[in-house]
Image (cartoon, helix red, strand yellow):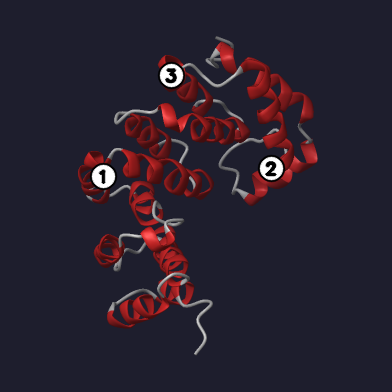
Amino acid sequence: MKSGLHPYLLPLEEAFSDAGDPEIAAGAAAYMKNISSFYGLKAPDRRMLIAAFIKQYGLPEVSEIDVIIDSAWKHPMREMQYAAMELLVKSRKSSDEFRIELYERMITNKSWWDTIDYIAPHLVSFHFDHFVQTKSPVIKRWMESDNIWLQRSCLLFQLKAKAKTDENLLFDLISKLAGHKAFFIRKAIGWSLREYAKTNPASVIQFVQSQPLSGLSKREALKHYTK
């Protein structure tokens, strides 16, 4: 493997490198607080390159997914992590109950809001819907982990659930984290409530008024509410 990158991904690495823009890369790095280096690809261009790559090389073999994604996650350029997530979404129907272990590695390594906020509603949500037996034990473990990114994932995996949201679970998780000091937890509490308020505003308003939430969480939760 070149620099630890799985051979399957080498053509994609080359395509990203050729299409990268140093000016865009510098801006992306600054915006992301220099948590990573970037090739400098706008999202539509990155997705176009990924689509062309998949068309030519196909999706990863199921038996190789873990090693392919792990190698992408170790890559110094952030776009390779974005590509890994998109490949997993396209491959998620072939997953099994143990795929959550890969998602957990992704959540807890090179952690920042950009990856968590994709993994939770697109990958973790799908996994819990299709492997229901894993849901309660994983959420319990993640909530007790003291890892803010695992906890944020618990708050956000239902972000797109709308009427299928498990309200009792969402409110219980928020209640347990209501006093958390971390910005990314308080922000996620507000965001998850704001999204659910689009489906059940009365329930969210009542919950917010009854809980000792931070000012940030309350503002985010009721951001679009008007009497």
Toward the bottom, the furthest residue is 227
Where does the image place residue 222, in percent across and percent down from the top left?
46, 78
Marker count (numbered)? 3
Disc 3 crowd, CA 10 A, few/some/many (<14, 14-19, 20+): few
Residue placed under numbered mark 2 in the picture: 43
Q: Which mark is residue 135?
A: 1
In terms of depth relative to the viewer, which is nearer, 92 or 219?
Answer: 92
Q: Residue at x 59, y 11 (%)?
A: 2
Which label's residue is closer to the chain start, 2 or 1?
2
Visible residue check, residue 42 = no
Horizontal placement of 163 versus 61: left or right?
left
Q: CA distance from mark 2 to mark 1?
A: 31 Å
Where does the image place residue 151, in percent across and percent down from the top left?
33, 52
Where does the image place residue 35, in percent across and percent down from the top left?
56, 42
Q: Which mark is residue 62?
A: 3
Which label's residue is closer to the chain start, 2 or 3?
2
Horizontal placement of 33 versus 186: left or right?
right
Visible residue check, residue 87 = yes
Q: Residue at x 29, y 31 (%)?
A: 97
Disc 1 crowd, CA 10 A, few/some/many (<14, 14-19, 20+): some
Q: Secondary structure at mark 1?
A: helix
